[in-house]
Amino acid sequence: MISSETILIVIGVISLAVIMALIRIVKGPTAPDRVVGLDTVNTIVISSMVLFGAAYNEVIYIDVAIVYALLSFISTLFIAKYLEGGKF
Amino acid sequence: MSIIDIIIYIFFFIGVFFSLLAGIGLLRFPDVYTRLHAGTKCTTFGSIFLIGSVILIGFRSWYFGSTDGSILVIHSIVALIAILLTNPTGAHAIARAAHRSGVEPVNAVVDDLKTKNKTKSNNTANKKKTGEEK
């Protein structure tokens, strides 16, 4: 059996990648660098939400992850369209 | 420890490894496009394995007669499909926006996309001129 502590350790290790992406968001010289860091943070947060749902046996976390994935995709597309300039 | 536990541990290891590679690549690469390469592909590949391990956990509890396991499997597959469809599309949009907003690749000598767009616009301009002359 996979205990829930193992899944929580996995979530703790992949949150190091979130910290590295946050450093890139703070440092990033241009605006597209920051958008790339935000996209990475979004993807890791989605996968850790699914892992939380498996760790606590709560299916509602995975539903939240689905909605978060679609909303973060829409926000990324809008930021990209804004950076591109021109008419919407 | 059964065989499916070993498979789940291997999936955890691969997912964590590629997620950490994404973070290291975001810190170390010199350029927007190479950072995009690291930060999007590696997290997509790592998410496949992390969510795949959750799917395997759900399959095992489904096999032992829990109804929560089936819901876990189906919803995790939907979340995986959402990630697989949206993540490369967002990366393509960011790359196009970065190129059009004037961010140059580091150490780039020739920008093929720029010359291609220029020749295409020249061709359309020439066609318009000839059309007006006729």
Image (cartoon, coloured by chain):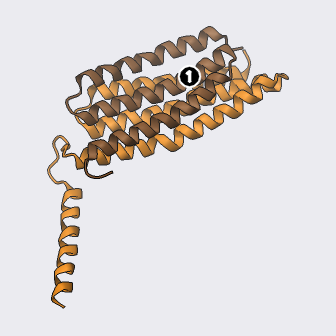
- Which SS class for mark 1? helix
Instruction: Give the chain coloured brown.
Output: A
Decide if residue A72 is on the left or right side of residue B55: left
Determine the chain carrying the residue at label 1.
A
Instruction: Choose top left, top right, bottom left or bottom right for residue B8.
Output: top right
The C terminus of chain B lies in which quarter of the figure?
A: bottom left
Q: Which residue is mark 1?
A: A49
**Residue situated furthest right in the rendering:** B65
- Which one is nearer the viewer's eye here, B6 or B18? B18
Depth order, front residue of B109/B94 = B94
Specify the farthest residue to the bottom: B134
Q: Position of residue B51 (x, y in %)?
A: 59, 29
Whole-percent x, y for residue B121 in the image: 21, 68
User: What residue is at 70 percent from the left and 27 percent from the top?
Assistant: B72
Residue at screen point 22% across, 74% down: B124
Viewer can see residue B18: no
The spot of residue A33 in percent (x, y) is: 27, 33
> Quick one: which chain is orange?
B
